[in-house]
Image (cartoon, helix red, strand yellow):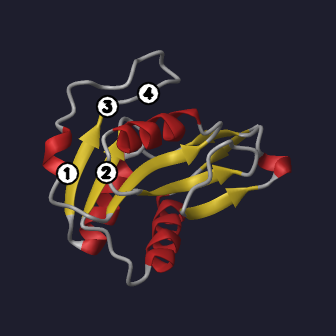
Amino acid sequence: IRRVISWDEYDELCSHIAAQIGENVPDAIVGLTRGGLVPAVRLSHMFNVKLYTLNISLRDGKAPSTKFSWKQLDKYSRVLIVDDINDSGATLFEVHNQFYTRAFPNPKFATLLSKRSSKMSVDYVGEHINKTRESDWIVFPWE
């Protein structure tokens, strides 16, 4: 079964995330390529904060990016990592480990959708996907 997310639904998901963040506004946002870029841009505009991109995709067999300039985040204490979906949690877990091994403050994570069965917990979620919808193939409006 396919679930097609409309632009209006996408806006609502971003608004839900922003409401959860409230006054805990990040200093910087890191969007994960590819799916996390669109919501990361939207949230960076909503909070008027700097946006960075991290090229990582375990699903596509790409190793974590070593080309990312981690030093550019040194001046930030509240970093928000954004992706489109928290599926298995493998990608987010890898990103968390990369931050941890570089002694960065614990970043927060946000995804538009998050499966309850994921091995990685997300701080801010547009919508939790319940058991009956977890097998749906999600199609975002930019795909």
Given residues 30 and 16, the one toward you in this image is: 30
Q: Are marks 3 and 4 in contact (CB under 8 Å)?
A: yes
What is the distance, in whole Å, between disc 3 and disc 4 at their CAs? 7 Å
The numbered dot on residue 73 is: 1
- The kind of secondary structure element at disc 4 is loop
Q: Residue at x 31, y 31 (%)?
A: 55
Label 3: element kind: loop
Quarter of the figure with residue 64: top left
Q: Position of residue 32 (x, y in %)?
A: 37, 41
Label 2: how many Cα within 10 Å (few below 14, some 14–19, many 20+) = some
Q: Are marks 3 and 2 in contact (CB under 8 Å)?
A: no
Q: Callout 2, which amino acid? A: Phe
* Label 3: few (<14), some (14–19) or many (≥20) C-alpha neighbours in 10 Å: some
Q: Which residue is depicted at the point 38% across and 30% down?
A: 56
Mark 4 vs mark 1: in front: 1
- The three-letter amino acid code for the residue at tag 3 is Asn
Q: Earlier in the sequence, mark 2 or mark 4?
A: 4
Residue 103 percent location from the top left of the image: 32, 46
Disc 3 to disc 2, C-alpha distance: 18 Å
The answer to whether residue 78 is above or below residue 23 is above
Q: Secondary structure at mark 2?
A: loop
Q: Label 4: which residue?
A: 57
Whether pointer 1 and pointer 2 mark residues with C-beta atoms closer than 8 Å, the reply is: yes
Q: Residue at x 68, y 42 (%)?
A: 119
Q: The C terminus is located in which quarter?
A: top left
Q: Which residue is mark 2?
A: 104
Q: Nearer the viewer, residue 138 or 56?
A: 56
Q: What residue is at 22 percent from the left and 54 percent from the top?
A: 51
From the viewer's perspective, is the residue at label 2 or at label 4 nearer? 2
